[in-house]
Image (tube, grey):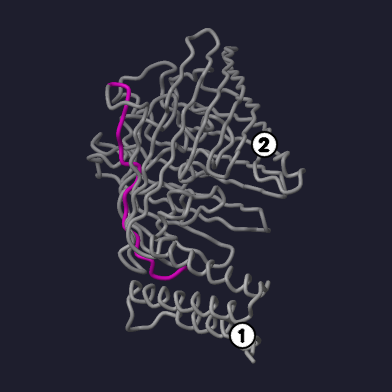
Amino acid sequence: MTDHRRGRSAPCARVLSLLLLAAPAAAQTQEERIAALEQEIARLRALLETSRQEAGRADTRFAEQERRIEALAAEIERIGLGEAAAPATADRPGQGLGPAASKIYRTPRGVSIGGYGEAIYTDFEGDPSRLDFLRAVLYAGYRFDESWIFNSEIEFEHASTGEDGEVSVEFAYLDYLWHPEASFRGGLLLVPMGFLNELHEPTTFLSADRPEVERQILPTTWRENGAGLHGEAGPLAYRTYVVNGFEAAEFTAAGLRGGRQQGSEALADDFAWVGRLDAEALPGLVVGGSVYVGDSGQDLGFDVPVSIVEAHADARWRGLQARALVTQADLDDVDDLNAALALTGDDSVGERMRGGYVEVGFDVLTLLPEASSSLVPFVRWETLDTQEEVPSGFSRDPANDRDLWTLGLAFRPIDTIILKADWQWIRDRADERLDEFHVAMGFVF
């Protein structure tokens, strides 16, 4: 008589042997380990079928063992293919990067491909409406081994390479992952300030367009050539880099945005240091800040020191999500800069710029059991002044001191696609008013 219990227990023993075999051997390459695992899975499948035939009837324990074997096979296949087989998700950022940009860090070895795109329709009050495929982005990374990683982002803006379009490298760097607490990074780096300069994929923020404070003062997307350290220790995460400084000759009364050198034949007479620290103070609550200090005169013959500080907090609790950010930039030698740029009156570059915003949203679909989509109504109040202080003899332009209210809705049918609509009311101290309506779609992969 056949011992059915022995036939059923054999797959369990084989699964145990499979798990032991999965432990890396010093003399085996990853490819050799995968091949050995696949052979063992084939033997397990054959043994399971034999045991089922000997039993002569269906058995839920056989079905459970088969499910486990197939799950192991699927996992091995995913490892063999690398991260190209695993989609990005909105809740998996890492290494100071967005969920798609950080895919290479979840790849065992070889190539990783990701990307994102976004399009936006804008109805301007009193002006022609615009429909723009704002950007299409490709991430390409390569993992050489357990320690060395190359990562890059190539961006196509406005669906064209012509006069209005642009093709640019957003970042391209090498990482040496030494220890979780200290790794080395060098190349064209995203400056780690604010929320969106590093996490600027469309699924990581609710509004159709990026907040104006993070566009003009910080200013996204801001990247410079440099090198430094990054790491994590418990609830703390940090990044600290030395980068080439701004080019002050491109500053305007509207902010620092024009001074980004973006890695393209960057002037390097002046350098800067930037550091960031974040802490998960409580589950779902991250607080942090960053500091940037450096000169920006480059070849002007004087320094134009720039310092920027910002503090931020991000809270997630059940369906509630809230963000707050404040920032201030201070510049010296602005009177010399104005003279060199022939600026007069209220066209002065600001000696002090400040801004901040508060945003609150709630995912109403969390109130439904087992909902897989999200629908987030939100509101954001934003204030900024890029000429809070100007040198003696110059005046402030009240149009640069403004408040913005944004009321909107963000719908994510699946984790990697987002649809947005919002209304924005802009009011400045010159009593000028501008209303805008936006509809946008975005995706990551």
Tell me if residue 249 is in the magenta stretch. Answer: no
Q: Which residue is mark 2?
A: 376
Residue positioned 30% across, 48% down in the render: 225
Secondary element under disc 1, as helix, strand or loop, is helix
Please give left or right for residue 242 compared with residue 76 in the image: left
**Circle 1 crowding by C-alpha within 10 Å: few under 14, some 14–19, many from 20:** some
Vertical placement of residue 196 versus 340, above or below = below
Q: Which residue is mark 1?
A: 9
Q: Residue 27 occupies which quadrant of the picture?
A: bottom left
Between marks 2 and 1 in the image, the one whose residue lies nearer the viewer:
1
The residue lying toward the viewer, choosing from 389 and 14, is 14
Q: Quadrant of the N terminus?
A: bottom right
* Residue 203 rendering spot, x and y as whole percentages: 54, 41
Q: Label 2 vs label 1: CA separation?
A: 50 Å
Extreme residue toward the bottom, this view? 1
Q: Quadrant of the C terminus?
A: top left
Residue positioned 62% across, 47% down in the render: 313
Whichever of callouts 2 and 1 sits on the residue coming sooner in the sequence is: 1
Secondary element under disc 2, as helix, strand or loop, is strand
What's the residue type where badge 1 is placed? Ser
From which residue to which does the magenta span run?
A: 163-181
What's the residue type where badge 2 is placed? Val
